[in-house]
Image (cartoon, rainbow, N blue to C red):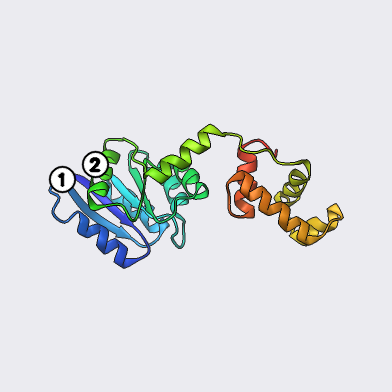
Amino acid sequence: MIRVLIADDHPIVRNGLRGAFADEPDIDVAGEAADGRQAVELAVRLGVDVVLMDLRMPVMSGVQAIAALRERAPAIRVLVVTTFDSEADVLPAIEAGATGYLLKDATPGDLLRAVRAAHRGESVLAPSVAGQLMGHVRRPGGPGLSKRELEVLRHVAEGASNREVARRLFISEASIKTHLLHIYDKLGVRDRAAAVGEAYRRGLLS
């Protein structure tokens, strides 16, 4: 019997996922969680085999919950089930320890196969997610940052606001915003914090 925990902050989604397993003799939904922290606590306490994890949840994000589970209960497999498939969503989840990554438009059959595969320790990825990972592997370094972009990023990493960075570099605040957009695009991220984290991961900042 595969014991499953459903972690999603939307009750309708949880009900839909639970319904997908209703007639499966080898899968039992042991519990439900509405936020990341609750997901971690329940998964550990109930001793489940697989967690279906949304990424955007209150209290603790899905990525944080995945990392916490890997540390506290590494035998528990995590299958991400979300609507987001950008590189900025996929890579952190996989790096945190997710076994698989599905989108919420997956068919019930795909979901069932993914849960069983995750239980066996096999990776199951939505086609768009697999494409993101292949693209990342083919360009592991990504486009290089210019000298000015690195300067901007170093100041951002120190906690400086756009206005402060502009003052330090003697350029306009609008130029800083433009540099940041180029940085986000080159690093495949969406915001300042993610840009700094990715830059450290790639060794661009030390």
Q: Element at badge 1?
A: loop
Q: State the residue at coordinates (43%, 53%).
A: 62
Q: State the residue at coordinates (15%, 45%).
A: 26
Label 2 or label 1, whichever comes before in sequence order: 1
Q: Amino acid at mark 2?
A: Arg
Q: Is residue 112 above or below residue 7?
A: above
Q: Amino acid at mark 1?
A: Asp
Q: Which residue is mark 1?
A: 26
Q: Nearer the viewer, residue 108 or 165?
A: 108
From the image, which quarter does the C terminus lie in? top right
From the image, which quarter does the N terminus lie in? top left
Mark 2 and mark 1: Cα distance apart in space: 9 Å
Where does residue 131 sit, x and y in percent of width and height? 44, 40
Position of residue 102 in the picture relative to residue 171 (left or right): left
Q: Which residue is mark 2?
A: 116
Q: Nearer the viewer, residue 82 or 135?
A: 135
